[in-house]
Image (cartoon, grey):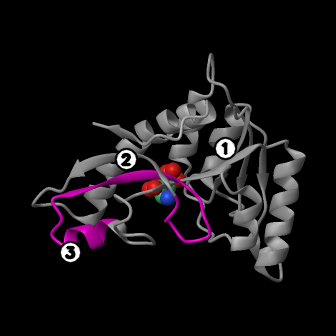
Amino acid sequence: MIRRVAILISGGGSNMVRLVDSMTGDHPARPVLVLSNVARAAGLDHAASRQVPVATLPHTDFADRAGFEAALHDRLCAAGAEAICLAGFMRILTPDFVSRWQGRMLNIHPSLLPRYPGRDTHARAIAAGDAEAGCSVHEVTAKLDAGPILGQVRVPVRADDTPARLASRVLTTEHRLYPAVLRRWANGCRDPLLLP
Ligand code: GRF
């Protein structure tokens, strides 16, 4: 069972807020740290107002990725984190860091993986003429956006969709999916969750 979760963000943190707000009552886990690699990320204020410890660790303060990740690992350990949720964290983590947290790190991605790892997922889905887009929560492995899928929500693509419109509908489904997957996963369940 996972009891202590750190959440890494780079921006607005709307998924982080849903995760934090979900970790109450009989949920096995509690948020122990929200950390941003961007100093003024709006999500930091949302976390602080919920009495969650916050930290900033600008990657620009470090000469290389190894230095940044060593400091990140130390901060996570100092907070007693047992697991990490990436929630709009816009840094690619090296295999070395991932291996230290393998099986203990989740990510949410705005596509129906394995389709469209990486960026611009909504524009790519529209350009391909896909009938459905969606979001996925997966375990993080060394290969980008390719770890075991723990949950998905499908979202119909509309004829008049723009990437921004589709992104906004997908984001509302992310807010349902990520807390639901985290709760199960923290309780030891690895079966994929397919929400309507
Ligand atoms: C979400 O679309 C998530 O899937 C992606 O980055 C975005 C973060 O949004 N990884 P927010 O910061 O949680 O609002």
Among the two numbered marks 2 and 1 on one chain, the one whose residue lies closer to the N terminus: 1
Q: Which residues are magenta?
A: 122-147
Instruction: Report the residue that reaches farthest toward the bottom.
Output: 63
| Residue at image location 25% in from the left, 49% down from the top | 155
Q: Position of residue 94 (x, y in %)?
A: 69, 73
Three-letter amino acid code at the position of disc 3: Ala
For the C terminus, give its image quadrant: top left
Does residue 124 show up magenta in the picture?
yes
Does residue 96 show up magenta in the picture?
no
The answer for how far apart the CA atoms under marks 1 and 3 are is 36 Å
For marks 2 and 3, give the one nearer the viewer.
Answer: 2
| Residue at image location 18% in from the left, 60% down from the top | 161
Q: Nearer the viewer, residue 131 or 36?
A: 131
For the N terminus, give its image quadrant: top right
Label 3 CA crowd tier, 10 Å (few <14, some 14–19, many 20+): few
**Residue 165, relative to residue 180: is it above or below?**
below
Q: Is residue 153 left or right of residue 45?
A: left
Q: Position of residue 145 (x, y in %)?
A: 50, 65
Among the two numbered marks 2 and 3 on one chain, the one whose residue lies closer to the N terminus: 3
Q: Which mark is residue 127?
A: 3
Q: Which residue bears the numbered disc 1?
A: 45
Q: Nearer the viewer, residue 99 or 42?
A: 99
Q: Is residue 147 left or right of residue 3?
A: left
| Residue at image location 21% in from the left, 68% down from the top | 126
Three-letter amino acid code at the position of disc 2: Gln
Among the two numbered marks 1 and 3 on one chain, the one whose residue lies closer to the N terminus: 1
The answer for how far apart the CA atoms under marks 2 and 1 are is 29 Å
**CB atoms at circles 2 and 1 under 8 Å apart?**
no
Q: Which residue bears the numbered disc 2?
A: 152
